[in-house]
Image (tube, coloured by chain):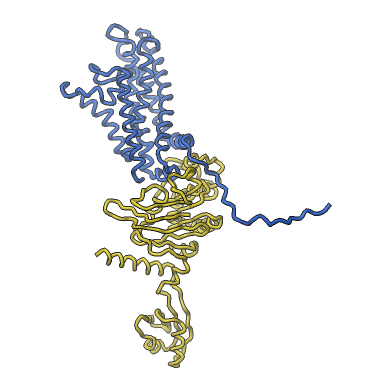
Chain colours: A blue, B yellow
Amino acid sequence: MSAVTRTGPAPSPVVPAPATLAGPVTQARVVRAEWTKLWALRSTRWCTLIAAVLIIGVGAAVAGSGTAYRVSAGNPPAAGVSAALLGVLIAQLVLGVVGVLSFSGEYGTGMIRATLAVVPSRLPVLWAKLIVLAGLVLPVTLLCAVIDFFTAAAIESSRGGSAISLTDPGVLRTVAGSSLYLTVVVIIGLALGALLRKTAAGLSVFAAVFFVIPVIVEALPRTITGFAPYLPSNAGGSLWGQSASSADALSPWAGFACLCGYAVALTALAAWRLRRRDV
Amino acid sequence: MIEVDGLTKRYGGKTAVDGLSFVVEPGVVTGFLGPNGAGKSTTMRMIAGLDRPTSGTVRVNGKHYPKAPAPMAELGILLDARSVHPGLSARSNLLALARTAGIGRRRVNEVIELAGLGEVAGNRAGGFSLGMGQRLGVAAALLGQPQTVVLDEPVNGLDPDGVRWIRLLLKSLAAEGRTVLVSSHLMSEMAQTAAQLIVLGRGKLITESSVDDFIGHATTAGVLVRTPETARLGQLLAAPGVTVVNDGTDLLRVSGATAEQIGTAAWRAHLPVHELTPTHASLEEAFMQVTRDSIEYQAGATR
């Protein structure tokens, strides 16, 4: 046996490229990143909790007050359910704050610079925020709406009101519709935050569109408010029986499609601005 | 490597960066200097793709950064302004950035330890001091072990221990073959850390050179002469382009003449000389001189 000796040239002492752990940016990874941010923020958890309490609590209060709801020719089951979902109208403000803040909060704190420096193609950030917000709001509010339905139904029937079932005409659409409505409203909040970049501006416009303008329009003479059913709150409200302009409301799904149209248009504008403008 | 070519950025009518071209090579620390408003931060934002150039191009490691498939492996950046969410903990801030590139918790914990943030990683970043915020920003820049590191004023707000940490960190990053571009207002710190310099004035390139050349070319370099005959030697040396300053002691500060010329002149006139020391300008003096010239030139040129 002989000792093994190395005869060839030694490996070249070229400094190897430093090993890197950073992989490519993918939409799925950006979604995970945005979820990390969204759920780690206290404001998100508080707003979600408050929205849940509002939806269920206001529903129980409505069901337990006044005269018990009796189904009749002018009072369909869906209208009773819709009344028990009144808390959604307040919850939309709380959840709208989460939507607006998820973009404007990053501009306000400066984190947007770090966010877009690691995702320089930018648009995946917008899509990821949209996905995580919808992924949070839709299941949570749907669960709340269902709990609210059963709670309110139990309270009503204990007070001698009509027994309403999820299979009655329009009831399931009303319950699920309130949750779909809230989800699209939050996406509109997100788009406003991304477009306007300032929390105060985003929240003001959001509150004006969903709370102030519908009230003003309702107070104006009918002859000049033909557009009222197309206001986002009224159009979306058609889906779950809460359109303020009840007389000439759009059909449920036409109204919801109209609301979605606003969300798509605003999101497209936000995407365009995010791509084009300096941070 | 960072290659900047004909870079121009205008905001409305104001030109922040004006036809800037330079190359930052890997393996050494490159200092990025210039007075306030010279366009350093704007240039850094354009390198990271946050601001779009009005014209010109920036390439990071040979690529157009916004189209890089794995951005965090290419570039790590610390910007002058805060870029963390105050409502999130240091760890959550880092984790959110890390996840975009599939970087795991282990690396996040590594950079937390590296930046000396181990004990406060769970605290909300909003409660951090300026120095701790800087450490967090540097940790974020290092997350992806990027080929190129760009840091805007990293020692701003750091304690002496932190300043030393940054100095060693920058040198070790460069020694690993990475490209390191760092701006600072602390010239003494830059003189210790950087080997190359890029100097801006009013958005334009003034100088791109090694630190040694930059200091060597400064005309504030002079000769220190100690003599009991200050008045006579001063008269002897008087000539156009030569300045002699006497502060009342036996010391003369002479610029515009070499030690050889002064020594020979003194010997011929039989004047005693007790000390003859060529002095170099400090980086700070060289910087002041070069940027002042640039601003004067700029002001004259725009009239």
Left or right of residue A260, residue A6 in this image: right
The x, y position of residue B301, in whole percent, is 28, 65
The answer to whether residue B126 is seen in the rendering is no
Which image quadrant: the C terminus of chain A?
A: top left
Total count of labels: 0
Residue at x 37% of width, y 81% of height: B242
Query: Would you place residue A279 above or below residue B298 in this image?
Result: above
Residue at x 26% of width, y 53% of height: B13
In the image shown, does A174 or B92 lie closer to the viewer? A174
Left or right of residue A188, residue A248 in this image: left
Q: Quadrant of residue A266?
A: top left
The answer to whether residue B146 is seen in the rendering is yes
- Determine the residue located farthest toward the right in the rendered image: A1
Query: Would you place residue B285 above or below residue B153 in this image?
Result: below
Residue at x 34% of width, y 66% of height: B294
The x, y position of residue A110, in whole percent, is 38, 45
The x, y position of residue B1, in whole percent, is 48, 54
Q: Quadrant of residue A245?
A: top left
Left or right of residue A229, residue B211 in this image: right
In the image shown, does B90 or B266 lie closer to the viewer? B266
Query: Would you place residue B240 above or below residue B161 in this image?
Result: below
Query: Would you place residue B76 above or below residue A230 in this image?
Result: below
Q: Quadrant of residue A73?
A: top left
